[in-house]
Image (cartoon, rainbow, N blue to C red):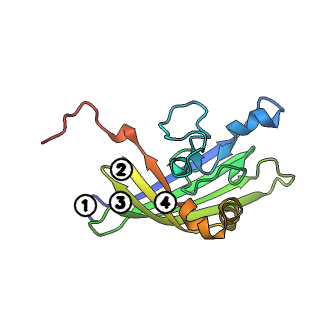
Amino acid sequence: FKKNKALYVRAYAGKFFGISNDPAVLQRYYLTTTYSGVNDYLYDGTYFDRSNRNIALAQQVSMQEGGFKVPTYNNVGMSDNYLLALNLKSDLPIKLPIRLFLDVASYSEANASSTKGKILYDGGVEVHFIKDILTINIPLIMSSDFQDYLKATYGKSQVFGHSISFSIKLNNINWLKSPSL
């Protein structure tokens, strides 16, 4: 009941229908829990590094598909069947630009022999700036699949640093409104 404070709830349900039998072609279009420049096959988002060459810039994510905040670039959180996700975010009753977030998803693993669904989650702190144009996500908890991926890719000592992501929403800028002096 505080002014300008809210609980944000977002749900996503997706089903993948392949139009080819070639996994090399289809993989680009798989449903993903974490959406980044690599997944933006329509090029409708603004990403600083689409091909993951610069590690810091490659940690940019978008609130699309699963809406997770942990940046991943392999089969973790990718589905060639279905993806169900719930994203929760809550303002804190203080004047700091900080929110808590929790993401939970169920999906079928891409190219897995089992059709059993898996559960992934991440949760932590979001720091938001300038009308949500820039947000920095700091996961404090995450499922073991994400932890194992980050350890195998970057090493055990680099897990925390590589789990941090950011979002830039240029569509939140009113380009026609002149800045007040």
Q: Is 127 displayed left or right of 71 in the figure?
A: left
Disc 4 secondary structure class: strand
In the rendered view, tell whether residue 45 sits above or below residue 10. above
Q: Which mark is residue 132?
A: 2
Distance, label 1 to label 4, CA atoms, is 19 Å
Mark pair 3, 1: CA separation:
8 Å
Where in the figure is residue 31, as x and y percent of width and height?
67, 44
Query: Is disc 1 placed on a helix, strand or loop?
Result: loop
Circle nearer the viewer, 2 or 4: 2
Labels 1 and 2: the sequence-earlier one: 1
> Which amino acid lies under the numbered mark 4 shown in the image of this protein?
Leu
Which residue is painted at 45% across and 49% down in the image? Answer: 167
Question: In the structure shown, which secondary structural element does the residue marked by tag 2 occupy?
Answer: loop
Residue at 30% across, 50% down: 130
Quadrant containing the C terminus is top left
Amino acid residing under circle 1: Lys
Residue placed under numbered mark 3 in the picture = 6
Q: Position of residue 176 (x, y in %)?
A: 25, 30
